[in-house]
Image (cartoon, coloured by chain):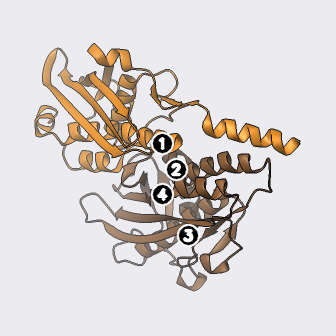
Amino acid sequence: MSKLRAFFAALAAVLSLASFAAPAQAAKIYVDNKLGWVKPEDKVQIASPQPVQLVIDFQTDGVTNAKAIKEVKPMIVKYLQQTALFSTLSETPVANGALLTVRFNNIADKNAAGKGFKAGLTFGLAATQVADNYDVDFALVPASGQEPLRAQLKHAIILTIGKKADPSLGTEYKKAKDAVDVMVGQSVEQGAHALARQDGFPGK
Amino acid sequence: MKRQWWAAAALAASLGGCTETLPPPAPDIEGLLALRSFDMPPAAVGQFTATGPAAAQDRGVTIRAGTFRPPEGTSWAGYLGDTLEAQLAASGKHDPQSPLRIEGELVENRRGENMSSGRATIAAQFRVRRGDMILYDKRLEQRSDWDSNYFGFVAYEAALRHYTALYPKLVEQLLKDPDFRKAVKP
């Protein structure tokens, strides 16, 4: 997400130059359709949802991003609550010691800023595309001393400049914030239900 | 004309300097797992101060035209103490009234970058006390090297990430230190 922010900063700089002479080239933001939402028939129903402690991490290239954690945490909590797989999400330890960790790792395209700069300087004639890839890891310790259940998945946000709309890239969103919200929501929903399908999930 | 004013403002915002304040530290997954892996009674977090050269570097970090600062009302030494406290609290092992007290001095706090690379180092002298008795007194250090970037905003974000990530890593190093675990044993 910080890469997206950097990309948009570069874009703002060059498009602002460009806008003195020519109409700004619109950036388009897509959420990859490969993952999607969990289908209603694939959703797991938990007989007796249990409380769990939640700890999250958001990394860029494997390094914790303190600012991004603050932005993403409310989204993760919102979508986890919507799954109804847990009775409560706590920031402190719960009675049975259940612990859920969720980690997003944003794999950065090191040329993102340069691509944005080039696209802006050429008023969008040098069309460009950047994929913002995410590795998402879930680990759930059902109770103190037990081995964790695990789930891993991948997701992506794609940004284009100077290109026509291309539905093959994913679902288009007008605002980066909305695209990030959907990417986080689909990841959390898929990851949580992947855990809930495993034996040993609390309250099953 | 209106569009040109907007464009000028966007240009200034993207190229100009800024100062931002970090949010309070959040508990870290590795630190939490480390705390769950051994028996430790609840502890208080004592004073965290900066000494020596680190005292002069205890407020903000400026990278190119941008500056980031620790949360309102704290210093980098305080940020280290708050990072430890967040870890202990998330593990149910923080008790401000506990006779077991962890305190520290930030003794090294360096960072810098050029167009191609960046480096940051922090080091702290940690002490664990029970009453007047010192149970642990050790210097621990974390360093990070990273690729920087020609673009200032990319360089700034990379420096912010790598520098601030040193704090939970230093706390994790403390929590995994066998000498620390021996010192705080119930």
Residue A204 visible (yes or no): no
In the image, A147 versus A64, the foreground residue is A64
Q: Which residue is mark 4?
A: A111
Q: Given this view, does label 3 or label 4 mark the residue nearer the observer?
A: 4
Q: Residue at x 22, y 33 (%)?
A: B141
Hey, what amino acid is under mark 2? Ser
Q: Given this view, does label 4 or label 2 mark the residue nearer the observer?
A: 4
Mark drawn on residue A2: 2
Chain-order first, disc 3 or disc 2: 2
| C-alpha separation, residue under disc 3 versus residue under disc 2 | 20 Å
Q: Residue at x 73, y 46 (%)?
A: A16
Locate residue B123: give its quadrant: top left
Find numbered disc 4 in the image and state the secondary structure of the residue it sits on.
loop
Find numbered disc 1 in the image and state the secondary structure of the residue it sits on.
helix
Pointer 2 indicates a residue of which chain? A
Find numbered disc 2 in the image and state the secondary structure of the residue it sits on.
helix
- In the rendered structure, the colour chosen for chain B is orange
